[in-house]
Image (spheres, helix red, strand yellow):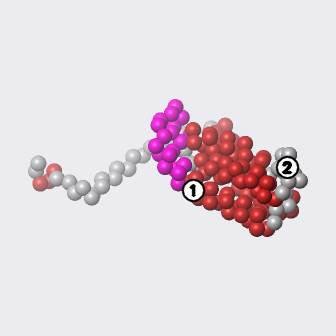
Amino acid sequence: MAADEQRDPLQINYTVVNQRKAPLTWRTRISYGVGHVFNDLCASMWFTYLLVYLHKVVKFSNTSAGTLLLIGQVADAISTPLVGIESDRTGRFKYGRRKIWNLVGVTSVALSFPFVFNLCLGCENSAQWAKFIYYTPFIVIFQFGWAASQIRI
C-alpha cells in the first residue's frame, strides 16, 4: 500500500448528504400530539398530584406517601437503563426494534395508571400496610411502562 493510501484510523471522513425528508402528514402530527398529551398528563399527575392524592384521599401518612413515590422513582431509575439495554438487544420487527418496547410501555402505563389513582379496590378500610402493598406493584409497573414508553423510536 502506498504511503498516500494509508489512512489514520482516528481520522474520520464526514460526508454531508443533502437529503430532504418528506413532511409529516396531518394524521402523523395528530398522532404524535395525542401521544404527547398522554405523556404529559401522566407526568403532571405523577409529579404534582401523587403525594397529595396518597395523603389526602388514600389517607397515607406523609412518610408512607413519600416512600411510595420514592419506590416509584427507584423503579424508574432501575428500569430506564435496563429497558435501554434490552431495546438495543431486541431483534428487528416490521416497524423497528423499539416500537414493541413503546407498545409494551404505553400498555403498562395505561393499565396501571388507573389503579394508582383510584382507591384500593376492596380494601378501602384496610390497614395502611395492606394498602401500601396494594399500591406498590402498580407504581412499579407504571414506572417500568414509563421508561419503556420514553424510548426514542
91 in the magenta segment: yes
Query: Dot 2 lies on which element?
Result: loop
Which residue is rendered at x = 56% and y = 39% of the image?
99
Q: Which labelled disc corresponds to residue 78?
A: 1
Single out the residue that lies furthest toward the right: 125
Which residue is rendered at x = 71% and y = 61% of the image?
69
Residue 120: x, y in percent?
83, 50
Residue 6: x, y in percent?
16, 53
Q: Is residue 30 visible?
A: yes
Q: Nearer the viewer, residue 25 or 48?
A: 48
Q: Is residue 32 visible?
A: no
The residue that disc 2 covers is: 123
| Label 1 neighbour load within 10 Å: few <14, some 14-19, many 20+ | some
Mark toward the start of the polypeptide (2 vs 1) = 1
Which residue is rendered at x = 78% and y = 47% of the image?
114
Residue 35: x, y in percent?
68, 45
| Label 2 neighbour load within 10 Å: few <14, some 14-19, many 20+ | few
Q: Which range is magenta?
A: 81-99
Quadrant including the C terminus: top right
- Specify the amino acid type for callout 1: Ile
Q: CA distance from mark 2 to mark 1?
A: 29 Å
Which residue is rendered at x = 72% and y = 60% of the image?
68
Q: Is the Cβ of the residue at disc 2 closer than 8 Å to that at disc 1?
A: no
- Specify the amino acid type for callout 2: Cys
Single out the residue that lies furthest toward the top: 94
28 in the magenta segment: no
Q: Mark 2, mark 1: which one is toward the viewer?
A: 2
Query: Dot 1 lies on which element?
Result: helix
Rendered image quadrant of residue 12? bottom left
